[in-house]
Amino acid sequence: MSSRPSLKAVAVAAGVSPASVSNAYNRPEQLSAAARERILDLAAQMGYAGPHPSASSLRSRHSGSIGMLFAQDLTYAFDDPYCTVLMGGLAEIAMEAGANLLLLQVGPHVVSQAYSRDEELRLVQGARRAALDGAVADGVHPAHPVLRVLAERDVPVVSTAVGTGERCVLIDDRGSAVELGRHLRSLGHRRVVVVTDSMDEGDPSLAPADTHLFPYARLRVDGLREGLGGAEVTVVSAGSNTQASGRRVADLVLAMTARPTAVAATSDTLALGLLQRFREAGLEPGTGISVTGFDDVQQAGPAGLTTVRQPVREKGRTLGRMLLDPSFTETRVTLATELIIRTSTAPAP
Amino acid sequence: MSSRPSLKAVAVAAGVSPASVSNAYNRPEQLSAAARERILDLAAQMGYAGPHPSASSLRSRHSGSIGMLFAQDLTYAFDDPYCTVLMGGLAEIAMEAGANLLLLQVGPHVVSQAYSRDEELRLVQGARRAALDGAVADGVHPAHPVLRVLAERDVPVVSTAVGTGERCVLIDDRGSAVELGRHLRSLGHRRVVVVTDSMDEGDPSLAPADTHLFPYARLRVDGLREGLGGAEVTVVSAGSNTQASGRRVADLVLAMTARPTAVAATSDTLALGLLQRFREAGLEPGTGISVTGFDDVQQAGPAGLTTVRQPVREKGRTLGRMLLDPSFTETRVTLATELIIRTSTAPAP
DNA sequence: CAGCGCTTCTGAAACGATCTACTAAATCGT
DNA sequence: ACGATTTAGTAGATCGTTTCAGAAGCGCTG
């Protein structure tokens, strides 16, 4: 049971230098066609699978993969509709560029919390072990240590939040939230609950700490507040961004003594959970209570959810281009949003 | 602008051997707590990000990532409902094991076609460059050269098809298709079109070559044939497994002079496309024409699609365990399926 | 006090490629 | 036919770790 041949072994067998074997795979133009043929034939015959990826990327400093950071849950990439579409856009560009796409696990990081060194090491472990040519950070708090690790490694990072020097793809979270808030206000809603996902886990509390909010969430909450003018606004932290969280918050809202006439969520995912639960409770959104979301994911249309549309797939594509297309030099791109009014909002009773 | 420090630089600065710095990160128990503290402090201070991933995996022969092979399109991972759920299960296990998940691009490979060496190199390029501890192959034809490359690299591969020696997670494609065929037969359908995805691209033809079918598709087609007994069966190749392909085939069916009373697709994705198009054409599935799918993806329920349910998430999880859980030694697992009868099938007119 | 087992740490050899700079031979223009 | 350029190929250093065998130090025991 002999071990696998290395590039050197192939070189020896072919009577050429190791450099030539390397060139046969990576730089055909540096080699006569005949020599290349001979080398590749021999390699195939010896069962040589081509240059070893780690050795190759150690020396060349390129790995052919870009990473996407997940600070919550790896499964989020496939479960959350916003994320799925973003990933689709990213994958599209990765494919064009011939790059592989690495889904990186990094631990959840709460800004206000102090971490021991070992906890912090565990937090960034996924990123420490991965060979990357670049990474995308969406929903990763700018203070997350993984960003420092990647910077120390000189791995380019692009994000969806204004961070420390990284390039980014943004939308006008605040402005579009203002517009949405005004819409609710113009419908006469004077008592509103704003629901946001946050890094708090556990039961929805009535007071998410500012430091526990992702930047986009803070901007949306602030925008809604502004747009809602003098209305009585209660901000509720839903925990992680899932429909289940939305449902949990719906129960909380239903139990309120002074029930709001509208509930505005910082994401469609949360809003869809709210809608579901309200409907189950016999409260038809639009008539009994108004609900709004954010993102305009695919299910929002069928559900009749009023929301802010953002071009998610385009966002993914742009992030990908920033990493993979050298001719793409812009350092900050802002994409347009649009208020989509559907049946889940109506005049306050 | 000094370059980044290496492990060795940290070792020199700390007055210890490189081995100790390595151990500080990877084997705390080999080191006194004090020494470890000192080393990690210094590393942090010097802006050392930890062991270089490529160097580390070159030496240790582990990368901390497992790969999923995509022979069609990377975006498939996020677009196709079957695939999304499978990936979710895989991601779940990867997360538990602390592994990253690499989405690998490999070119589409048609068995009957001859490839030049360069075409073949391009076909496997994604897999050649990636450092992997294992890979999952779903919908990759057993003859695809990427499987040979991975074998030559000693990368363990698990698949969803009976292949050459790999471990696999299966369902009884044939048996469940027989059952589905019998269901149609018992409803009196005597003229049936079977629609399958295949590696043929382009217009749906009336004759998919056997070599262009993925194993699961061939088994399902055969099973349907058997279950349909003496019915007149026409097999149609839809090309890639998308709703758009399903719609295209629907048009073809609508144009047939001897229109079938039922259409059976080898996947829900195709079936959902068919349903849509039939409905658009004013043909209510179940009454005008019967339609069946395969997989029982999430949309199948709301669409009223009769189909075969398979535990897709569990499949993903099992594939993940096979790669990541050393105590999981089974080499072949078969999961149970269930015929789900909904409104898209009804007695033949 | 020799001998033993532990813990803690080190030296040097891999791991498998690619890069830079260079040479020898072939081709070119005039 | 002769220097100038291009082409084909090579030598040797280098990328940054981890691993393995073993050394040094230390407290014990008999």
Image: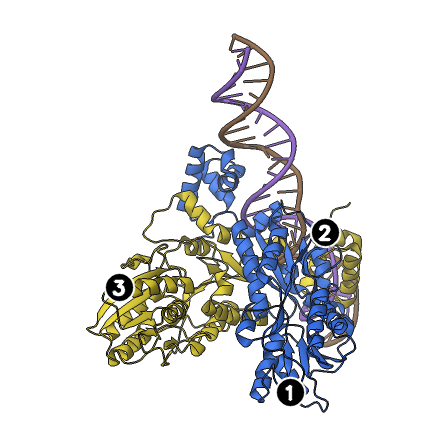
Chain colours: A blue, B yellow, C purple, D brown
For disc 3, the chain is B
Looking at the image, residue A333 sits to the left or right of residue B195; the answer is: right
Which marked residue is nearer to the observer: mark 3 or mark 2?
3
Q: Position of residue B41 (x, y in %)?
A: 79, 61
Q: Report the residue at 63% width, 60% height from top.
A: A129
Q: Exactly how many numbered labels are in the figure?
A: 3
CA distance separating discs 1 and 2: 57 Å
x%, y% of residue B196? 33, 64
B262 left or right, relative to A162: left
Comparing labels 3 and 1, the label whose residue is closer to the camera: 3
Report which residue position mark 1 lands on: A251
**SS class, disc 3:** loop
User: Which sits earlier in the primary sequence, circle 3 or circle 2?
Assistant: 2
Query: What's under tag 1, amino acid-wise?
Result: Asp
Q: Name the amino acid, label 3.
A: Met
Where is A303 relative to A23, above or below?
Answer: below
Q: Position of residue A164 (x, y in %)?
A: 76, 57
Q: Which residue is mark 3?
A: B256
